[in-house]
Amino acid sequence: MFEIIKKDPLSNARTGKLRTKNETIDTPVFMPVGTLGTVKSISPLELYNEGFKIMLSNTYHLFLRPGMEVIEKFGSLRNFTNYKGAILTDSGGFQIFSLSKFAKISNGGAEFMSHIDGSIHIFTPEKVVKLQETFDSDIIMPLDVFSGPGVSKKIAEKDLDITLKWAERSINAKNKEKNNLIFLISQGNFFDDLREKSAIYLSELNADGYAIGGLAVGEDKETMRDMLGISVSKLPENKPRYLMGVGTPEDIITAVSLGVDMFDCVLPSRNARTGFAFTSKGNLNIKNSVHKFEKQPIDDECGCYACLNFSRAYLRHAFMSKEIFSQRLLTIHNLHFYQNMILNIRRAINDGSFTNYKNDFLEKRQQIASLPEDTSLQ
């Protein structure tokens, strides 16, 4: 199911192959977020042709809309979305706590109020697994409890104990005759011993893969790195490791060096919709008036459709004029940037140059000076 291809001699970075029922995926891998079965402004074919062989969708959102009856009618989420690659579905636990006006957690499960119509629903670990089996997801994620930053250790420990019990129930609920994979989620908030406890306990359940959750939620970079390092060091080396909801290019390449294989984040598409582009020299705000007359593309080193065909001046004009096309072009560019970064990371690990690549990448990304924001149309 997961094969390690190459290990970097100077770090814990590695390349591998993850085999799911619908796709063989090279790792490290970045998964674009298609919460409702679509990555905003990008067609499924464009996504696949860009090289993204797996995307992430969300059980909570799809359960509420379009609803299970609709997806069941099509036989699978892949059929419904017409996406050719693999699909990982998150359980929606984070959304339950962040979107619901009313959420109650008990050992039994999570009771929540829909953010759409106020209807009350209950997710149990078993139900969440069955929902994702109805989606026929390539990778199933279990229900877990997200403590959030700033909670006491007592609360974090209570939430972790529920997460670990739910993980065991999720493993037992999975239909062993189906070849969907199931990953378990290591939590523990920002406490070293809880992070260790979580990773060790879950490792003994022998899941298909392991995720690290509850990071990149407002903590400083050093804390995130420390907690991630603890979790990764206690998780099985022969299983894929997935850092949930991360993140920036800098966070991704750092996590790869610690031994993480899989990532997802909304940043490429969300930032595009607010006028921000990722480039090899740093992040660029297309709204800035300095770009009004610039003939150069977003990134001279990029070969995406947007950079090959359009200037910064045109993109700024289209964005400031609220043309949807500008958001689409920026999304195309940002996704291409992430995919190209991942390809370069894999290549560097395989040829033994990862540490040099990482250092050069991080240094180069600091080149764009911080520009004052100017959203005027002058």
Image: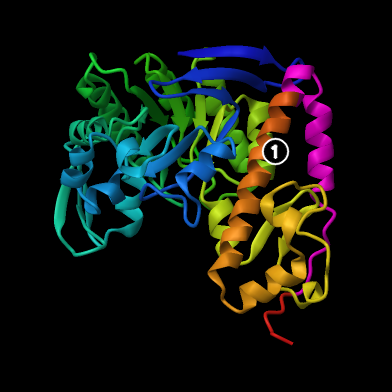
Color scheme of the displayed model: rainbow
Residue at the spot of label 1:
341
Of residue 233 and residue 270, the one placed in the foreground of this image is 270
Quadrant housing residue 114: bottom left
Query: Measured from the top left, where is residue 290 in percent x and y?
Result: 81, 74
Instruction: Kindly give the residue lying farthest to the bottom in the view shown.
Output: 378
* Amino acid type at mark 1: Met
Quick one: SS at disc 1?
helix
Which residue is painted at 15% across and 50% down in the image? 121
Image quadrant where one finds the N terminus = top left
Q: Is residue 368 visible?
A: yes
Query: Measured from the top left, where is residue 300 in percent x and y?
Result: 82, 52
Query: Measured from the top left, where is residue 317 in percent x and y?
Result: 68, 76
Looking at the picture, does residue 253 appear above or below residue 119?
Answer: above
Q: Which residues are magenta?
A: 348-372
Which residue is painted at 19% across and 39% down in the image? 72
Which residue is painted at 63% across and 20% down in the image? 15
Looking at the picture, does residue 359 appear above or below residue 369?
Answer: above
Quadrant housing residue 275: bottom right
Could you tell me what secondary structure mostly forms the magenta stretch? helix
